[in-house]
Amino acid sequence: MGLARLIRGEVLSLRAREFVQAARVIGVPTRSVLLKELLPNLIAPIVVSISLSVPAFVTAEAGLAYLGIGLTGRPSWGQTINQATGYFDEYALYLWAPVVGIMLLVIALNLLGDSVRDAFDPKTRR
């Protein structure tokens, strides 16, 4: 729902801009306005939103698995962290390995989303 709100707000703000109005005045069909004018300007906010939500989903799944909620019987970093808390005094690496793995995955997904946004953003110079 948040992504749909973001897209709607962007479309409403882009609809009032000069390049869209100019395309309508010269008689460009609505389909072409959507595909050639609006869509390139919508890709960057969509990619940013998705790239920020995927790491949130990963950490939410790990948190729910740590609490014992969700899928059971499947390997999960949250379940590994939950099992490792009892062994922290004896072998701390058993706890730190999945925690660092989650942290590196979240950072990598954020950096990947940022670089994809930079690649698709029509406002940046290449």
Image (tube, rainbow, N blue to C red):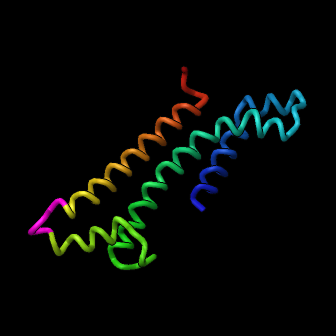
Residue 4, compared with residue 25, is above or below; it is below
Residue 112 picture location, percent across and down: 46, 41
Residue 36, compared with residue 52, is above or below; it is above
**Viewer-closest of 118 and 87:** 87
Give the number of callouts: 0
Q: Is residue 89 magenta?
A: yes
**Viewer-closest of 57 and 83:** 83
Q: Is residue 68 magenta?
A: no
Residue 76, compared with residue 47, is above or below; it is below
Residue 4 picture location, percent across and down: 64, 56
- Horizontal relation, residue 119 to residue 79: left or right: right
Image point (37%, 73%), residue name: 65
Q: Residue furthest top?
A: 126
- Horizontal relation, residue 109 to residue 1: left or right: left
Quarter holding residue 24: top right
Q: Quadrant of the C terminus?
A: top right
Image point (41%, 40%), residue name: 111
Quarter holding residue 42: top right
Secondary structure mostly seen in magenta is loop
Residue 69 picture location, percent across and down: 40, 79
Image point (21%, 64%), residue name: 95
Residue 3 picture location, percent across and down: 59, 55
**Viewer-closest of 78 and 75:** 75
Residue 110, compared with residue 86, is above or below; it is above
- Horizontal relation, residue 82 to residue 42: left or right: left
Range shown magenta: 88-93
Q: Quadrant of the N terminus?
A: bottom right
